[in-house]
Amino acid sequence: MHDKDHTHVRPWRMISRRKTRQIMVGNVPVGGDAPITVQTMTNTLTSDAKATIEQIRQVEEAGADIVRVSCPDEDSTKALKEIVAASRVPIVADIHFHYKRAIEAAVAGAACLRINPGNIGSPERVREVIKAAKDNNCSIRIGVNAGSLERDLLEQYAEPCPDAMVESAMRHIRILEDHDFFNFKISCKASDVFLACAAYQQLADRCDYPIHLGITEAGGLRGGTVKSAIGMGSLLWAGIGDTIRVSLSADPVEEVRVGFELLKSLGLRHRGVNIISCPSCARQQFNVIETVQLLEERLAHVTTPMTVSIIGCVVNGPGEALMTDIGLTGGGRGTHQIYLGGGVAHRLQEKDESILDHIVKLVEDKAAQIDAETAAQAQAEAPKDGPNRIEAA
Ligand code: SF4
């Protein structure tokens, strides 16, 4: 249920995270024992600050912890200051090659630069970019991509492979280390699940920097979700990954939602309502599919972690309800059973009240109760370091 850590009695649920250094992306810690963060990227024109801020607002509402924006030109880095000021979450500036854009982005308040130091150019330019990052408390993300490996590595290894990708990452790492810069994380992305996973595993063995996970260019909402769940899911299960981005040819809000679902499935983050529902069949006593679809929409605003089971009949309903905060099991003649806290609570007569309204009210009441308890507990414990905007993993 929402607040129970069962790993002590259910060790098969335990994920032992790789030990890493911790860096700060703005006010959000990444790596170490920090919760695994969910990122996405805007696809508006960055020079259009208004549109970009609007999209950042949408992904913030969906739960994004960190948002990346592309800075391909000077108009973009000019707009960045306004964007950073309006954002509640840290902003990562995505830079390719141009060192001036990197310096401008750091000065404009970016919390992180996504840039590969080996691609910046002369040693003097590299030094200037790293100095700008240091002076502006800006972290860096090294982003190795199988599709854009250095020519000499491609010649040496004949094709993109884990060894070549990790060699590329180590080169970039050495440049930052040589400048006494350690506030960085690394990604090693590929669109091929096998390649990405092997590269990430190798990278994880070679360094202790935080890792940004991603299966790049994964595809559309359905295909990309499956690919990401297999690739990133297996890495996260093995304890690898400190921040994630699900790359989808879809609305960035969907990337955030899928990212959270992935982490929720592995018990690594808890946010919002986790609906457990049956696929439905001829035994269903109400329309399960429609009910779940509408519930997902009506409960999207709830951020309090909670489990809700929506099950069509008594075959699996009571069993699933035992493990959830709120349960509904379809019963005969429009009379359904409601469970609260795993126990039988009351019956719902469909002729008197709609299933949807009833469940939404139960969830909202339960969320208010949990939030009040959490706030009281936090007050009692009087944390010394002030509030952290990310809930405990
Ligand atoms: S729980 Fe009942 S309605 Fe749902 S799929 Fe199983 S048998 Fe069918």
Image (cartoon, rainbow, N blue to C red):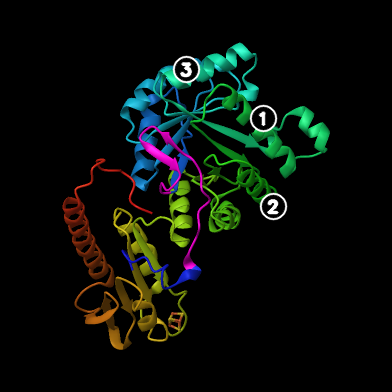
Name the residue tied to disc 2.
194
Q: What element carries label 1?
A: helix
In this view, the mark in front (3 or 2): 3
Viewer-nearest residue: 179 or 103: 179
- Going from the N terminus, do you reach mark 1 or mark 3 first? 3
Indicate yes or no whether the magenta region holds residue 110. Answer: no
Q: Residue furthest top?
A: 124
* Residue at the disc numbered 3: 132
* Relative depth, front residue between 54 and 374: 374
Rendered view: 136 above or below 10: above
**Image quadrant assignment for residue 353:** bottom left
Q: Where is residue 377 in the image (x, y as percent from the top left)?
A: 19, 56
Horizontal side of 27 relative to 129 (left or right) equals left
Circle 1 is placed at which residue position? 171
Main secondary structure along the magenta-highlighted residues? loop
Residue 325's image quarter?
bottom left
Q: Verify whether residue 16 appears in magenta.
A: yes
Q: Which secondary structure, mark 3? A: helix
Question: Magenta stretch?
Answer: 13-35
Q: Where is residue 84 in the image (x, y as percent from the top left)?
A: 36, 27
Label 3 Cα crowd, 10 Å radius (few <14 / some 14-19 / many 20+): some
